[in-house]
Image (cartoon, coloured by chain):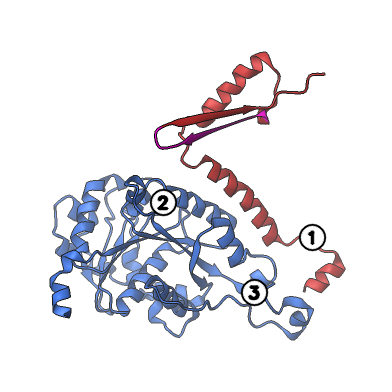
Amino acid sequence: MINNLSGNRKFILAKIIVVTSGKGGVGKTTSAAAIATGLALRGNKTVVIDFDVGLRNLDLIMGCERRVVYDLVNVIQGEAGLNQALIRDKRTENLHILPASQTRDKDALTLEGVEKVLNDLAEDFDYIICDSPAGIERGAQLAMYFADEAVVVTNPEVSSVRDSDRILGLLSSKSRRAEQNRDPVKEHLLITRYNANRVDDGDMLNLEDIREILAIELIGLIPESEAVLRASNQGVPVVHDDKSDAGQAYLDTVARLMGEEVPLRFHAAQKRSLISRMFGGGGRR
Amino acid sequence: MRLLDFLKGERKKSASVAKERLQIIVAHQRGQRGQPDYMPMLEQELLEVIRRYVQVDQDAISISLDSDNDCSVLELNVTLPNRD
């Protein structure tokens, strides 16, 4: 049965998930790396693609920057085969990275080229994670165009929430699913850099408010965590630090992406002094 | 904290200010979703034409484009001032 399944790979559709945000610096690449690694750790054949042509960084976060030979643009322009450009992750089985070009600009990507690469990858992988560049220009639109699902990375901060809403508008009008009148792209909200204590003090938007403003379902909540910088310093996606709060929160997110029901964690304030609790800082509203 | 704030009569929390501002700007953004790029220009020029005949305020005009399957309707609302 299992042999039969893998023999018929072509008939199993890979799920294409774009990790996007509009605003830069909110944690797209960190999230794409963590989600892709988490999916692979759960046994899914996963490839993560860097769409940030000219400013590649996924390779650094994944810790494979010295193994990049060919990239996405080389493949699209026929200068290298897909298998030459794919980098096999050293720590995690089932995980591959397709880096972006560092020397070309975003015009080197074409819609047809991206489609062909995704179609070829879909034959071999269960999940294709597209790490979008910031902005709403061509690069970001190409990264989202073919997506089945979108993870919209949002910080609890006004400019990030507003930009996320802009991206949601694009997903509902400028994606292949929208243009072909198919089922819309499934949109997920991923809140990162959440500081429950500041929320509790009334100085940070709480997750309910963000969810209500953007009107999409929450797929995960990643607390602001020292583990994230530690992970990027070392080039090891933060899910490998499974003792850390951020690592666990990303693993929860991955489980939800796979359809499991996992209760939300890390949303309650901690380490409050007795006095501040007595004066009403105990629970969230 | 909340009791203390209440006693001190402290100002509104910054997060609720953020929420209100976002609700307004996001609602505005959504109103413009899917509209053609020329809409703001069209609105401005229509306003100029109307002003040649009637003095109306900048915000007295609202314009929207609704599309059904096979037809689009351009809806223009102008609030004229009361005539005394």
For this view, does A172 lie left or right of residue A51?
right
In the picture shown, does residue A242 fall above or below A113? Answer: below
Residue B55 lies in quadrant: top right
Give me the residue at 81% from left, 63% from top. B10
Where disc 2 sits, the SS reads helix
| Chain letter for the residue marked with disc 1 in the picture | B
Residue A138 percent location from the top left of the image: 35, 45
Tell me the quarter of the image containing the N terminus of chain A.
bottom left
Residue A198 percent location from the top left of the image: 65, 70
Residue A242 percent location from the top left of the image: 42, 83
In front: label 1 or label 2: 2
How much space separates mark 1 and mark 2, taking CA atoms?
Answer: 38 Å
Viewer-side residue, B52 vs B2: B52
Viewer-side residue, A45 vs A274: A45
Give me the residue at 46% from left, 33% from top. B37
Viewer-side residue, B3 vs A106: B3
How much space separates mark 3 and mark 1, taking CA atoms?
Answer: 19 Å
Residue A62 in view of the camera: yes
> Mark 1 — residue?
B11
State the mark number for residue A197. 3
Tell me the quarter of the image containing the C terminus of chain A.
bottom right
Residue A60 percent location from the top left of the image: 34, 67
Where disc 1 sits, the SS reads loop
Asked if marks 3 and 1 fall on the same chain, the answer is no
Asked if residue B68 lies in the magenta stretch, the reply is yes
> Mark 2 — residue?
A171
Letter of the blue chain: A
